[in-house]
Image (spheres, helix red, strand yellow):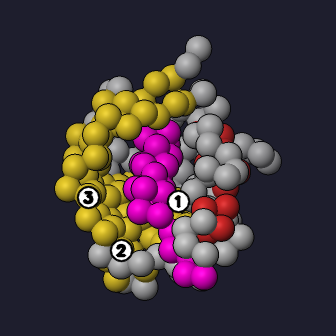
Amino acid sequence: MTEETAGAAPGKTSYPATEADIHLIQRIIPHRYPFLLIDKVKEIVPFKSAIGVKNVTFNEPHFQGHFPGAPIMPGVTIVEAMAQASAVLVGISMDVVDRDLLVYFMGIDGCKFRRKVVPGDVLELAVTVKRGGGKIWKFDGRATVDGQLACEAEFTAMMDLRG
């Protein structure tokens, strides 16, 4: 039993969760296939950091055209996956599970790509809060595969609770 479910009624989560499976992720962010780009978030430290996990598989729709015969995960989807991991971190931190959270990019700075990400890779998305607590949050993100840096960026997002 994880801290996520320890002491919780069936189907409920006790907070703060230290990890989020796909079910909890979908209760925090509105993204769905084919644009839900994270499989779980682990090592969640509210208001500080988390690590998202993306299992990269050949059957993802972008690989049909990026690139035929040499599938490479598009860089923008790596940055989006970091943002989704960050949104889950915010959702846990602000206790907005089941509250209809939307997240909007406001800026991406210093983005660099260092390694190709291909089917079969496990992409780890380490995100750290630089500033946050209200509507506007700023993060540092580092995406790695087997400890090798694939992408890094600083990004800013606005959190919007609908309704």
Mark toward the viewer: 1 or 2: 2
Image location of residue 37, percent across then percent down: 57, 57
Mark 1 vs mark 2: which is more N-terminal? Answer: 1
* Dot 1 or dot 3, earlier in sequence: 1
Residue 158 horizontal side relative to residue 121, left or right: left
Residue toward you, 108 or 127: 108
Q: Which residue is mark 3?
A: 111
Mark nearest the camera among 1 and 3 is 3
Position of the N terminus by quadrant: bottom right
Task: Say which residue label 1 marks.
Answer: 41
Amino acid marked by disc 1: Val
Towards the viewer: 35 or 127: 35
Q: Secondary structure at mark 1?
A: strand
Any magenta on residue 77? yes
Distance between mark 1 and mark 3 Cα atoms: 22 Å
Q: Position of residue 146 (x, y in %)?
A: 43, 85
Compared with residue 96, is residue 138 higher up or lower down, i.e. above or below? below
Quadrant hosting residue 135: top left
